[in-house]
Image (cartoon, rainbow, N blue to C red):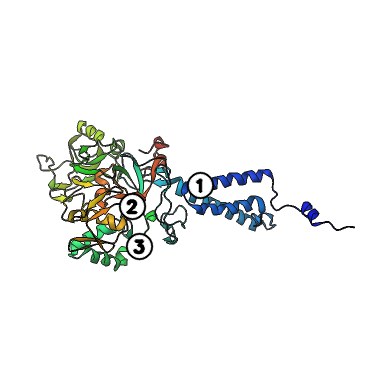
Amino acid sequence: MSTPSKSQKGEDSPCRFSAPKAKWIRLGIWGMITIIFSLWTRSGWWLLALPFFFDLYITRFFPWGFWRNSKNKTFKSIMDWTDAIIFALVAVYVINIYFFQNYQIPSSSLEKSLLVGDFLFVSKMSYGPRVPNTPVSFPLAQHTLPIINTKSYLDKPHWDYKRVPGFGKIKRNDIVVFNFPAGDTVPVKQSNPDFYTMCYYISKENNISRAEAGQYIRNHPETFGKVVYRPVDRRENYVKRCIGLPGEIIKIINNQVFINGTAIKDEPGVQYNYFVQTKGSYISDEQFRKWGVSKDDRELLTENNELFNLLPFKKNVNGSVNPVYRFPATQALVRTLKSSAAIDTVFIESDMLGGNNLGGTTYPLNDRIKWSRDNFGPLWIPAKGSTIKLTENNLILYKRVIRNYEGQNLEIKNGKAYINGKRADTYTFKMDYFWMMGDNRHNSADSRFWGFVPEDHIVGKPICIWLSLDKDRNFLDGKIRWNRFFKKAY
């Protein structure tokens, strides 16, 4: 019997690259998706997936799904679940970064446009997905893993800011989700107010420098907790309405917002705090529900309240005062209140009532600039490529931008600016910045208090509400707001 030749052996032995046509088609589809995705994200790292796809569908060098042939049912079940969970986590990771993210409204800063308990679909595509600064992270955890309370991400590798092309740019009155700019340094036990505002108040109360105030916070972890630093993409997510765009000048006079000297119209959901005095009766919970005022947002003033004697309330013949409430209201609700037979007096809350700054100290946290919540500016919003003179006033307004957001080593010596060790009379901005405000104007911690939002902090745009739960009600009493399902978020 003759021995087969080498050529005959090659013809008869199976080819490593032989595979059913359907698998080649699947490989082609996933390969094209990977290449297009890599070009879109401008990242060659995604191409590393191609060899894995080739082996999965064609060569099978690695025993993918090896456990499926196991006779141990327990082992097979565990591995099936592990495989499904890993696939789900990878899918969620990619979707969250580049396409959509779920977000829940935690506070009333945007009422009545968005309500506490609204769950939103946030589109990353609207303004272009941002490539993560910290790519190695656990999906669905912003910065801390629940229960074990440890970081949900690794500090390294750390990638510089880059944004993938999206559908458009931020426009005025867009509602925007972004990372909290002042959330870089956080005392974990007391995050509100932010670290920098806390330092400002501590320095004033104790007549010390802000650096000393910051060290005081770090030296007292029993009160403030450990002070941690968070990279941009791991800072808390905030949602506000964009009021000012790069290169514009914003000014607020008695709550009226002006952009470049022109008054802009408030959105219908914008509201302010009002003092409301009745003609004798108390306002019921049911009435407040009809008006859309939550329990947390309303307050019944008593004689023990420090504001009580500062307000021009009407007194009865016997010297008593009818019930007085403080709560936010839209202009539509104000008209309803003023026309009600049960209401006596309605007037707006002033930010400097009786000399008390009810709104608190505003940006830039400097005693030389006397701005307030309701009367603010004028302030120019930095734009990429624009240059300013570094005057004493400009350094007060923009030093945080230059240092913290643009990463420059800015030193001020004898009133002169030195950037990265060199004397500087001007500065050219490297990013665009935005001015964000809440619709619940008297109950919103926004740009009036912590300043500009850099473009690298922008997360995305809410598209719609997919679930809405009323925190003041139970499930048998209308907790689910069915009328808000799939409502546009605007």
* Helix, strand or loop for disc 1: helix
- The residue at the point 65 percent across, 45 percent down is 24
Indicate the amino acid at tag 1. Phe
In the rendered image, the vertical position of residue 229 relative to residue 267, given as above or below: below
Find residue 372 and report its horizontal and vertical position in percent.
19, 48
Tell me which label, 3 or 1, sits earlier in the chain: 1
Crowd band around label 1 with a 10 angstrom C-alpha radius: few (<14), some (14–19), many (20+): some
Find residue 272 and report its horizontal and vertical position in percent.
23, 41
Q: Closer to the camera: disc 3 or disc 1?
A: 1
- Residue 181 visible here: yes
* Helix, strand or loop for disc 2: loop
Indicate the amino acid at tag 3. Val
Find residue 309 and report its horizontal and vertical position in percent.
13, 47
Crowd band around label 2 with a 10 angstrom C-alpha radius: few (<14), some (14–19), many (20+): many
Find residue 385 and report its horizontal and vertical position in percent.
30, 49
Q: Which residue is mark 3?
A: 228
Q: CA distance from mark 3 to mark 2?
A: 15 Å
Q: Which residue is mark 1?
A: 37
- Residue 115 visible here: no
- Asked whether, in this view, residue 224 is left or right of residue 31, the answer is left
Q: Are marks 1 and 2 in contact (CB under 8 Å)?
A: no
Indicate the amino acid at tag 2. Phe
Tell me which label, 1 or 2, sits earlier in the chain: 1
Q: Which residue is mark 2?
A: 180
- The residue at the point 18 percent across, 49 percent down is 371
User: Residue 259 is drawn in which quadrant?
Assistant: top left
Q: Closer to the camera: disc 1 or disc 2?
A: 1
- Asked whether, in this view, residue 356 is left or right of residue 75, the answer is left
* Viewer-nearest residue: 50 or 327: 50
Crowd band around label 3 with a 10 angstrom C-alpha radius: few (<14), some (14–19), many (20+): few
